[in-house]
Image (spheres, grey):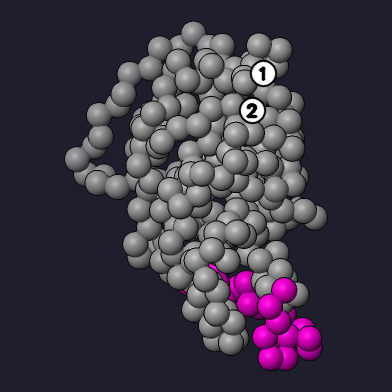
């Protein structure tokens, strides 16, 4: 049930990144498979889905504890060093082949056209967030928050609270958009309304029920759905025409 009737009006939208803005979740699983395989740990798809939405350093620490590899007890290589190997693969993938998720161009244009502020709150590292923004033409999003900077990653709400502080808004005036169950829980823990766009491999996860609204893709986001979760604006938006010279990614702002 929506609690938008008693919450402040939504003034900003805070976006998750992996699996929501860019199609990187399969690449994450491939990178984790390769790097952990080098350590002698074989991860199944279910293993990796269970940690989806969590920061990669947390993921490394989890598997060091739960499924230790030979020499894991020595601490070498460190969690940070292993995480860097995974992120290196991800940055290379994004720069070479990163593609926006369905509906991203239109959804971001909608938010900007309605005068909503936009930020990113991701479990990924800053260098991967920056690579994604460069790839998708999202350089104009200057509030980019990484759970790497927090004591607790998702499903704790810390990274969303940081984004709200940087926006100088109360959490209740921010709407989160997430694709993972851990991300939905993080947004709700921060006191934000949340729209979920579930990962196709996790659509039956009951944790998505914590979101105020569930969409099949960002293509379904429109003014009426934003109103249903607390946006009270009056701006009218018209879908922009895509420039023939920019075949992928978000259209740059005019003017």
- For the view shown, which residue lies furthest in the left direction? 244
Q: Quadrant of residue 189?
A: top right
Disc 1 residue crowd, few under 14, some 14–19, many 20+, Cα 10 Å: few
Pair 2/1: label in front: 1
- Going from the N terminus, do you reach mark 2 or mark 1 first? 1
Residue 99 in view in this figure = yes
Which one is nearer the viewer's eye here, 164 or 187? 187
Residue 182: image x %, image y %? 64, 48
Q: Quadrant of residue 165?
A: top right
Residue 126 in view in this figure = no
Q: Is residue 67 magenta?
A: yes
Left or right, residue 167 beside residue 201: right
| Magenta segment | 66-91
**Residue under pointer 2:** 193
Considering the numbered disc 1 on the image, is that residue within a helix, a strand or a loop?
Answer: loop
**Residue under pointer 1:** 3
> The C terminus is located in which quarter?
top left
């Amino acid at each position: 049930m929506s609690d938008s009737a008693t919450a402040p009006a939504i003034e900003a939208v805070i976006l998750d990144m992996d699996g929501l803005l860019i199609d990187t979740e399969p690449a994450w699983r491939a990178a984790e498979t390769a790097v952990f395989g080098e350590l002698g740990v074989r991860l199944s798809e279910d293993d990796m889905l269970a940690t989806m939405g969590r920061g990669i350093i947390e993921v490394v620490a989890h598997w060091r504890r739960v499924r230790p590899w030979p020499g894991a007890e020595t601490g070498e290589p460190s969690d940070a060093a292993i995480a860097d190997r995974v992120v290196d693969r991800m940055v290379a993938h994004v720069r070479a082949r990163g593609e926006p998720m369905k509906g991203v161009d239109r959804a971001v244009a909608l938010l900007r056209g309605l005068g909503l502020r936009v930020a990113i709150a991701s479990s990924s590292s800053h260098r991967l967030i920056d690579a994604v923004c460069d790839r998708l033409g999202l350089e104009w999003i200057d509030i980019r928050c990484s759970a790497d900077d927090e004591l607790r990653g998702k499903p704790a709400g810390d990274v969303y609270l940081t984004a709200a502080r940087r926006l100088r808004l109360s959490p209740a005036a921010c709407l989160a958009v997430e694709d993972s169950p851990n991300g939905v829980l993080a947004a709700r823990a921060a006191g934000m309304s949340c729209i979920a766009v579930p990962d196709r491999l996790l659509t039956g996860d009951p944790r998505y029920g914590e979101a105020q609204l569930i969409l099949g893709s960002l293509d379904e986001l429109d003014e009426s759905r934003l109103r249903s979760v607390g946006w009270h604006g009056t701006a009218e938006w018209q879908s922009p025409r895509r420039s023939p010279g920019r075949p992928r990614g978000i259209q740059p702002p005019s003017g």
